[in-house]
Image: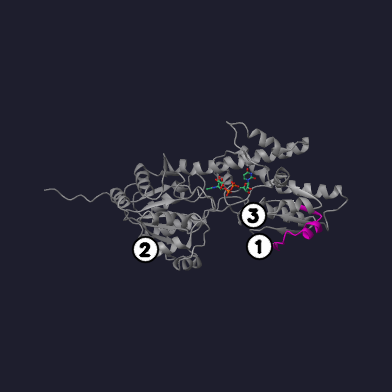
């Protein structure tokens, strides 16, 4: 007599991936989670989004997107098609067959990884973990997080990883505002705790993501993300040091870099600037440095690059003070206009922006600081509370110094060149004006 053998949870899940009947859960509906939720819905899966922020859930349930790369039309379309719903009720985490955790991993004040959001999400998942569920961590974090923090918590339920439930890490590669690369067409790295975990994750994700890149472990997948962004931090640190070197040698660093970039192989162009901002590059190298310190190894090279980048705001403020001094003006009482405060061009995000350091350092020296940024109408950060001023000739003439910190495309740099009495250009933005002449 044959006994019907229960189909193994892995095979059930793979089957649900293939016929799109798997219910996908996404925890954290921000710039990573919401686009991911939309891609799974677009691929035909039903998606249940979770967020602790009631305003976010209310907005999405009303068909409004709060994320620049996700249209409200898409949210409305998938709501109507019953392919997407949002909730704050984490007790419903037993419902999804897949749970992708896309919560923030900021740094603490002491530059240590703050994994409290990941721990909170893990605890919620643990409360409702059931056979057949796949849990995927997407948040950028130090290598070992999935195995050392999530696995023990989930194993404590008595369920067995790779057999009853599945656990993987897949780093987010979302570049907000990127017109070419999005969640669907950006290759996605995936690492599982077990071979079966990897197999199940690939089966689910390949339904919504065009190219998957399986690697041999969750640590490998965690390190891939850290390497990608540390690579940028180190190369930005290199060109920032070159900017200081060229300044001392009286050479134009931008000319040197542009000429070096004509090398058709073996060189990637990075540009010096006022320092590095954003939610990735200033943070990611610290995750690795922190982890390696626990293993008694100092990532000196990586930390040094971070120190150089972090010192750039002060470097440029000293340049302003020196240039004012050459005109017999003290920094104290001088009017300085900062042009561009977002952390990089053509966006409105001020997170970790070096402009905030530049403003604070100028104000500490007694300068009277104003700013103009077409993308940032008001600037509120701690003790800074300013409103963007129009870039009118009289504002430019009234400033003792104009410092260009972020080189947004929409700023009339020829007006600055024409009316500003003194310009410190951290992005070489004015050169493009002269080159256009
Ligand atoms: N920066 C420089 N010089 C450069 C490049 C950047 O000073 O040559 C500064 C920027 O002004 C900014 C900071 O560094 O303040 C970070 O710039 P970024 O271009 O790395 O932009 P981010 O922080 O938005 O990085 C994101 C990352 N994406 C993900 O983590 C998924 C990064 O991996 C991308 O490469 C980057 O976007 C991108 O290419 O746009």
Please provide the residue range marked out in magenta: 384-402
The quarter of the picture where residue 432 lies is: top right
x then y, percent, for residue 326: 86, 47
What residue did someone put label 1 on?
377
Left or right for 260, reference 49: right
Pointer 3 or 2: first along the chain: 2
Q: Are marks 3 and 2 in contact (CB under 8 Å)?
A: no
Residue in the picture at 81% in, 59% down = 398
The total of numbered circles placed on residues is: 3
Can residue 293 be seen by looking at this rendering? no
Left or right for 401, reference 139: right
Disc 3/disc 1 C-alpha distance (Å): 11 Å
Quick one: label 3, few (<14), some, or many (20+) residues within 10 Å? many
Pointer 3 or 1: first along the chain: 3
Disc 2/disc 1 C-alpha distance (Å): 37 Å
The quarter of the picture where residue 268 lies is: top right
What residue did someone put label 2 on?
81
Up/down of 336 relative to 271, above or below: below
Residue in the picture at 55% in, 41% down = 292
Q: Name the residue at the front extreme.
A: 437
Disc 3/disc 2 C-alpha distance (Å): 37 Å
Can residue 2 be seen by looking at this rendering? yes
Residue in the picture at 66% in, 37% down = 258
Front: mark 3 or 2: 2
Quarter of the C terminus within the rendering: top right
Query: SS at mark 2?
Result: loop
Query: SS at mark 3?
Result: loop
x then y, percent, for residue 114: 55, 53
The label on residue 342 is 3
Q: Are marks 3 and 1 in contact (CB under 8 Å)?
A: no
């Amino acid at each position: 007599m044959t006994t019907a053998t229960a189909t193994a949870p892995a095979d059930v899940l793979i089957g649900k991936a293939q016929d799109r009947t798997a219910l996908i859960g996404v925890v954290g509906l921000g710039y990573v989670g919401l686009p991911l939720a939309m891609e799974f819905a677009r691929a035909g899966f039903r998606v249940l989004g979770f967020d602790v922020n009631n305003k976010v859930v209310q907005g999405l349930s009303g068909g409004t997107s709060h994320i620049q790369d996700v249209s409200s039309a898409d949210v409305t379309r998938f709501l109507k098609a019953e392919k997407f719903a949002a909730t704050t009720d984490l007790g419903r985490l037993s419902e999804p067959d897949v749970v992708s955790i896309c919560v923030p991993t900021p740094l603490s004040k002491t530059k240590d990884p703050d994994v409290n959001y990941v721990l909170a999400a893990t605890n919620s998942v643990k409360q409702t973990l059931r056979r057949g569920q796949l849990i995927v961590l997407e948040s950028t974090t130090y290598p070992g997080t999935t195995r050392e923090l999530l696995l023990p918590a989930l194993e404590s339920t008595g369920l067995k990883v790779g057999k009853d439930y599945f656990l993987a890490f897949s780093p987010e590669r979302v570049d907000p505002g990127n017109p070419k690369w999005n969640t669907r067409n950006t290759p996605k790295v995936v690492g599982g705790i077990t071979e079966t975990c990897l197999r199940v994750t690939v089966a689910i994700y390949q339904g919504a993501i065009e190219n998957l890149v399986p690697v041999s472990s969750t640590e490998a997948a965690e390190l891939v993300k850290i390497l990608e962004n540390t690579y940028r931090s180190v190369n930005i640190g290199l060109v920032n040091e070159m900017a200081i070197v060229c300044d001392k040698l009286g050479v134009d660093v931008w000319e040197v870099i542009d000429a070096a970039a004509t090398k058709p192989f073996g060189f990637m162009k990075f540009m010096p600037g006022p320092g590095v901002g954003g939610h990735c590059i200033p943070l990611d190298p610290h995750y690795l440095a922190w982890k390696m310190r626990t293993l008694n190894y100092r990532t000196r090279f990586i930390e040094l690059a971070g120190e150089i980048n972090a010192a750039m705001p002060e470097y440029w403020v000293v340049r302003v003070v020196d240039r004012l001094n050459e005109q017999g003006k003290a920094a104290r009482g001088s009017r300085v206009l900062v042009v561009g405060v977002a952390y990089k061009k053509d966006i409105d995000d001020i997170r970790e922006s070096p402009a905030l350091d530049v403003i604070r350092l100028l104000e500490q020296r007694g300068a009277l600081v104003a700013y103009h940024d077409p993308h940032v109408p008001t600037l509120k950060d701690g003790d800074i509370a300013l409103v963007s001023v129009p870039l009118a000739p009289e504002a430019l003439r009234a400033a003792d110094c104009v410092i260009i910190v972020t080189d947004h495309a929409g700023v009339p740099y020829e007006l600055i060149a024409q009316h500003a009495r003194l310009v410190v250009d951290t992005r070489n933005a004015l050169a493009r004006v002269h080159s256009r002449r």
